[in-house]
Structure formats: structure tokens, C-alpha cells
Image (cartoon, coloured by chain):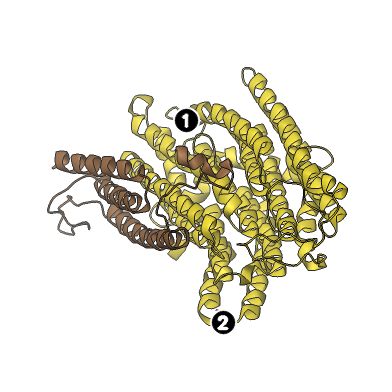
Chain colours: A yellow, B brown
């Protein structure tokens, strides 16, 4: 057993209480510790990705209890990829939060941030369905704190809705797990795969109910129609760096569906054949439509970006719903792309809103360094809408290519292409209102517009540290596009490993003793 | 006993579902509490109902025992739902003090309609 597998969970779990108890009065110390911890997490994640790239499914047995009885963590290419994605995103967001001073506008930002990382990494690594629930709760309880960070009227009210929504989702998760345990007698994912493959079709009703309940729970996390309505209110009222970090939270839902509904309730098992895809596909189509019209109709910048996140989740789930290795490769590429694209937009929006002092899409006198922000927003919007040369174009191309399935192609292509068009129009309108039209407006005498409520910062020019994280996120999109060949080769291997159910099961249940 | 357990879960779930659809924070919190009671009993029953049996295998050859795993799951679920309810009460209280209203939907006032989609749910 390689003990590094549990390091992405242990490291933030140890750092968070230390930051909360020892460094709560010293923001500088907390910042340094938090950033160092996240850099270390990134190093560990890179190491784990190299380890997993060999193609072996590494299993970590907690307490060395054998698999169906003890809890296991499983590191394969997919979980390593997601942990790496989390670590890169976390570092970008954290540097932004420190540079713009967001972390000092409320208490315990860094402790909550580390707890959030612990929950996300744990959810990606665990090989046990109940343990997945526990890590979901860890990441959620940290996200409640981050969501209402720095307070404010609208934010607190949106926070209550967010918490209620997720508590209802957690209850549903427990109902699903109870049903699953009652019908199969296990909650280990590999063991579930074995038991479910032995259940004859006529006795599979309870397992099918459990699989559908789990899908609804993960759809809530992934903001899929008809349970997407919490996302725009939450993301647009959360602090912008937190919204950027939340870009990975919707992917936790997507990851859980990919993991459980291919490995445990997979395609090819008689008990659950074709069930998840049949529901996911129409839901994904409607989600794209909601996202696109939301972008078109938004009157504020943050909801606009939040709706574009909804739309990107729809595009992602169109590819997931096919449940074939090719389509999963496309979905994985789109997961990586859309995480950085959404985060990048939220970070840039934060810089812009801090200078405009509000996020309504109205024409105001131009902000300082109007051209710089216009260029950044333009690039990020290109990434999100899926125009060349950034990775959104390649991601959507892969999705369209994977969707050349008779019967699905017409719907999927129409939805993705029309959705992209509407998103482009929406972003173009927002960009021209924010950056282009203001250059025709002459600043009034005082030159500043002050809106009560949010902390108002003077419209000073941006420091390199403030803008560096946004540029780094854009650079990741460019790198994804430039290195699309090697990346998609890795993702091909990832989805092949994901669909190799027997490999996963035998690695977990029949480990080869090496020490 | 099966009937009592099943109807208890059903009644708790129905009451909880009704309450979380209310418009004010306090009934919603009560509803979530009822739902978590329902799911705890449900989890407990998922290991089959058994009376007067130990959750360990007897070394005297008596094969009857009750499944210990759901009891462990329930314990975890109780702890988590208790903590979450406490967090929700505090956030709800914070929102009430900030907004001077305990309605759970967002205003239809000066802010735009994007946030108000939830009110329709």
C-alpha cells in the first residue's frame, strides 16, 4: 500500500484546525500556511497522477481491513485526474483570494478552504458509497461557511436556500444508501458491482430505485435539470473567489455519476442496463437550454456567469449520458475545461465588479485599465462559449464527435450548437455593455459611483498579483488546447480504465500483496 | 412491527416534505429535522428488523444476530444531521438578523429576477 494516497485528505484535514485554532488572529500566518499547504497538495496530486498514469488501480485500505469490510480509497487515473484538477484550481483561487483581500473580509476563510479541499479530495478518492456521503457532507459544511463568507443581506438569504437545498439532498442520499444496502448488503463500490451483476432483472427493482435516487442526488450537486435552480442564486451571491472554487463542486456530482453509474450500476449489467443514460440525456438537453437562455436574459454579471456554468454542465452531461468510452473521454476533457473556464470568468468578474462597485450590466463610465479587463473577459468568454482557439472549442468538438449516435445526434447537436450561439450572444452583449459602450461615456464630475453595502475599493490600477490568477486560469485553457493530443491520450486511457469494471473490482477485492 | 416502522417512516417523511415546502425558515428547519429522523429509522431498518438479538456473532453456535453495519451508519448519519441542523439554525438566524425577515425566498424587489427563481419552487 502506498500511504501517499490518503495524503490529499490528511494534509488539509490537519492544516484546517491548526489554522482555525492557532492562526485565527494572524491573517498573514494563515495565508502563508494555507498557500504552502495548497502548493504541497498540488505536489502530492502531481505525484499521484504520475503514479496512476502507469495504469494500475492502487487501493489504500484504511486500518488494513480487507476490502468489503473496511473502507478503501481507490486511486486510478480518473480519481488522480480529479484530485490534480482540484489542487490546481485551489491554488489559483487561493492566490486570488489573498491578493484581493477577500480572505480578510470575514473569519476563518483559510480553515474553511482547507476543509473544503479535504472533502473534495476525499470524495474523489473514496471507494465506498457511504464514505462518499461523509466526504460530501464535509465539503458541504465547509461550503456553507465559504458561501456566507463576509456576510451581507442577500448573501445570507441565498446561503439559507443553499443549505436547505443541500440538506434535503443529503437526506435523499441517505435514503438511497439505505435502499442500496437493504437490497445488496454492501456499500463498497467494487462489491456493489459484483452483487448487482448477479441480481436477475426481475428482482432488480429496489436496486434500480436506489440507482435513480443516487442519480437525483448527484444531479442536485451537478445542477442538472430539474434540480438546477439553486445554482444561479448561490453562485451569484457567493463571494467571487468562492464561486470560482465551487466550479469544482458541480464536477463532484458529475464524477460521482461517472464512477457509480459505470462501475456499480454500469452499462452492460442486466439489472441497470441503459437506465441512467435514458434520463440523463433529456435532462442535459433542457439544462443546456436553461443555461443559454439564462445567459441571454441575465441582468447582472455574476448570474450571467452562473447560468453559463449551468449550460456547461448540460453539455458535459450530454456526453456522460452516452456511457461509452469515447463519449466519456469527451466528457472528461470538458470537465477539465469547464472547471477552469468558469473559475476564470468568476475571478475576472470579481476584479471588474470591485472596480465598478456593482455587477449590474449597465453602462457606466469606463473603469481603470478598461482595455486589460476587456481583453481578459473576452478571452475567458471565448473559452466558456466554445470558440477557437481555447479549449472550449475542442471540448465541444469532442462532445459533438462522440454524440454521432443514431437517435441522439439530432437533439444533441442542435442543443449544443444553438446553446453555444445563445451563450456567445449573451457574453457579447455583456462584454459590450461593460467595456465597449463605457468608452463613449464621459465620466461625470466626481467620476465615482458609490453603492452602499459591499466593501468599496478605490478604482486603482490592478496589481500583478491580483490579475495573475486569472491569467493563470486562462493559460491553463490555452495549455489544454495546445496539449490537447497528450491530454486526450491520457483521458482515453482514463475512460478505458473506468469502463474496465473487472480490473477495478479485482484490484479492490483481490489485492496482490506486495509487502 | 414492520407495519409500525414502515408507517412511522412514511408519516415522518410526509410531514417533513410538507414542512420543507413552507415559506419560512423555522418550519423548513423542523421539516429537515423530521426528514432526518425518518431517514435514520429507515437506515436502521435497512439491515432487517430483529428483536432481542446481539449485533455480534455468538461463539456458542447461535447463528442469529442483527446486522451491526446499519447501526454504525445510523450513528454517523445522526451525528452529521445534528451538526447540519445546528449550522442551518445559525445561518437562518444570521439571515433573519440581516434581512429582518424569516422568509426563505428572495425578494422581488430592487434585485433582479434571476435570484427569484427559487421562490417559484
Label 1 CA crowd tier, 10 Å (few <14, some 14–19, many 20+):
many
How many labels sit on residues?
2
Q: Nearer the viewer, residue A508 or B45?
A: B45
What residue sits 62% from the left and 78% below the top? A27
Determine which residue is flagged by label 1: A269
Chain of the residue under label 1: A
Q: Position of residue B27 (x, y in %)?
A: 32, 50
Q: Where's residue A368, x and y in %?
A: 83, 60
Image quarter for residue A200? top left
In the image, are marks 2 and 1 on the same chain?
yes
Q: Of callouts 2 and 1, which one flags the residue occurring earlier in the amino acid sequence? A: 2
As drawn, is A512 to the left or to the right of A330?
A: left
Residue A2 against residue B21 in the figure, above or below: below
Task: Give the residue displayed 42% in from the left and 49% down from the top.
Answer: B104
Residue A25: assigned label: 2
Q: Position of residue A305 (x, y in %)?
A: 67, 45
Q: Using the image, determine if residue A297 lies above or below residue A151.
A: above
Q: Nearer the viewer, residue A490 or B43?
A: B43
Q: CA distance from mark 2 to mark 1?
A: 55 Å
Circle 1 sits in a helix, a strand or a loop, which is it? loop
Residue at 42 percent across and 50 percent down: it is A164
Q: Quadrant of residue A71?
A: bottom left
Callout 2: SS: loop
Image quadrant occupied by the N terminus of chain A: bottom right
- Does B120 appear above or below B47? above
Name the chain letter of the residue that bears numbered label 2.
A
Q: Is residue A290 visible?
A: yes
Residue A315 seen in the figure: no
State which mark lies toward you, 2 or 1.
Answer: 2
Give the image location of residue B61, x and y in percent: 16, 54
Amino acid at each position: 500500500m502506498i500511504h501517499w494516497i490518503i495524503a490529499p485528505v490528511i494534509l488539509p484535514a490537519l492544516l484546517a484546525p491548526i489554522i482555525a485554532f492557532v492562526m485565527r488572529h494572524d491573517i498573514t500566518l494563515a495565508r502563508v500556511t494555507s498557500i504552502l499547504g495548497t502548493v504541497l497538495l498540488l505536489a502530492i496530486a502531481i505525484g499521484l497522477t504520475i503514479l496512476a498514469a502507469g495504469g494500475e488501480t492502487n487501493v489504500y485500505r484504511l486500518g488494513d481491513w480487507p476490502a468489503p469490510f473496511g473502507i478503501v480509497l481507490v486511486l486510478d487515473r480518473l480519481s488522480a485526474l480529479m484530485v490534480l484538477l482540484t489542487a490546481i484550481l485551489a491554488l489559483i483561487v487561493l492566490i486570488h483570494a489573498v491578493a484581493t483581500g477577500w480572505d480578510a473580509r470575514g473569519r476563518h476563510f483559510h480553515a474553511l478552504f482547507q476543509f473544503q479541499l479535504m472533502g473534495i479530495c476525499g470524495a474523489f478518492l473514496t471507494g465506498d458509497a457511504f464514505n462518499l456521503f461523509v466526504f460530501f457532507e464535509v465539503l458541504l459544511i465547509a461550503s456553507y461557511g465559504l458561501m456566507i463568507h463576509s456576510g451581507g443581506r442577500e448573501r445570507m438569504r441565498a446561503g439559507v436556500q443553499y443549505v436547505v437545498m443541500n440538506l434535503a439532498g443529503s437526506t435523499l442520499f441517505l435514503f438511497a444508501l439505505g435502499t442500496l444496502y437493504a437490497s445488496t448488503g454492501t456499500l463498497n463500490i467494487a462489491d456493489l458491482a459484483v452483487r448487482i451483476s448477479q441480481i436477475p432483472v426481475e428482482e432488480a427493482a429496489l436496486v434500480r430505485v436506489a440507482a435513480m435516487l443516487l442519480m437525483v442526488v448527484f444531479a442536485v450537486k451537478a445542477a442538472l435539470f430539474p434540480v438546477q435552480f439553486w445554482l444561479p442564486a448561490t453562485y451569484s451571491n457567493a463571494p467571487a473567489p468562492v464561486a470560482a472554487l465551487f466550479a469544482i463542486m458541480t464536477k463532484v456530482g458529475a464524477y460521482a455519476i461517472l464512477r457509480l453509474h459505470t462501475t456499480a450500476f454500469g452499462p452492460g449489467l442486466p439489472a441497470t442496463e441503459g437506465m441512467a443514460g435514458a434520463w440523463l440525456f433529456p435532462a442535459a438537453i433542457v439544462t443546456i437550454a436553461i443555461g443559454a437562455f439564462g445567459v441571454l436574459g441575465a441582468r447582472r454579471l455574476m448570474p450571467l456567469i452562473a447560468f453559463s456554468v449551468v449550460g456547461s454542465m448540460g453539455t458535459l452531461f450530454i456526453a456522460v449520458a452516452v456511457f461509452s468510452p469515447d463519449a466519456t473521454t469527451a466528457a472528461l476533457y470538458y470537465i477539465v475545461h469547464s472547471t477552469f473556464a468558469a473559475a476564470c470568468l468568476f475571478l475576472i468578474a470579481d476584479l471588474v465588479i470591485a472596480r465598478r462597485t456593482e455587477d449590474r450590466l449597465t453602462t457606466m463610465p469606463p473603469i481603470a485599465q478598461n482595455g486589460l479587463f476587456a481583453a481578459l473577459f473576452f478571452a475567458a468568454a471565448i473559452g466558456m462559449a466554445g470558440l477557437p482557439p481555447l479549449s472550449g472549442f475542442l471540448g465541444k468538438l469532442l462532445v459533438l464527435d462522440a454524440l454521432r449516435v443514431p437517435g441522439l445526434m439530432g437533439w444533441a447537436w442542435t442543443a449544443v450548437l444553438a446553446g453555444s450561439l445563445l451563450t456567445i450572444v449573451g457574453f457579447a452583449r455583456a462584454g459590450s455593455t461593460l467595456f465597449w459602450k463605457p468608452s463613449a461615456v464621459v465620466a461625470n464630475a466626481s467620476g465615482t459611483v458609490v453603492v452602499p453595502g459591499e466593501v468599496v475599493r478605490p478604482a486603482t490600477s490592478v496589481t500583478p498579483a491580483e490579475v495573475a490568477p486569472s491569467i493563470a486560469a486562462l493559460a491553463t485553457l490555452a495549455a489544454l488546447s495546445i496539449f490537447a493530443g497528450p491530454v486526450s491520450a491520457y483521458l482515453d486511457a482514463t475512460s478505458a480504465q473506468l469502463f474496465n469494471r473487472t480490473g477495478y473490482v479485482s484490484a479492490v477485492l483481490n489485492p496482490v500483496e506486495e509487502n | 412491527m414492520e407495519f409500525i416502522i414502515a408507517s412511522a417512516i412514511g408519516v415522518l417523511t410526509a410531514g417533513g416534505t410538507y414542512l420543507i415546502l413552507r415559506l419560512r425558515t423555522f418550519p423548513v428547519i423542523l421539516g429537515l429535522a423530521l426528514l432526518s429522523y425518518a431517514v435514520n429509522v429507515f437506515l436502521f431498518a435497512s439491515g432487517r428488523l430483529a428483536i432481542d438479538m446481539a449485533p455480534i456473532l455468538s461463539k456458542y453456535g447461535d447463528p442469529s444476530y442483527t446486522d451491526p453495519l446499519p447501526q454504525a451508519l445510523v450513528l454517523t448519519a445522526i451525528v452529521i444531521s445534528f451538526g447540519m441542523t445546528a449550522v442551518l439554525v445559525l445561518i437562518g438566524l444570521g439571515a433573519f438578523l440581516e434581512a429582518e425577515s424569516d422568509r426563505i425566498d428572495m425578494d422581488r424587489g430592487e434585485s433582479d429576477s434571476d435570484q427569484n427563481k427559487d421562490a417559484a419552487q
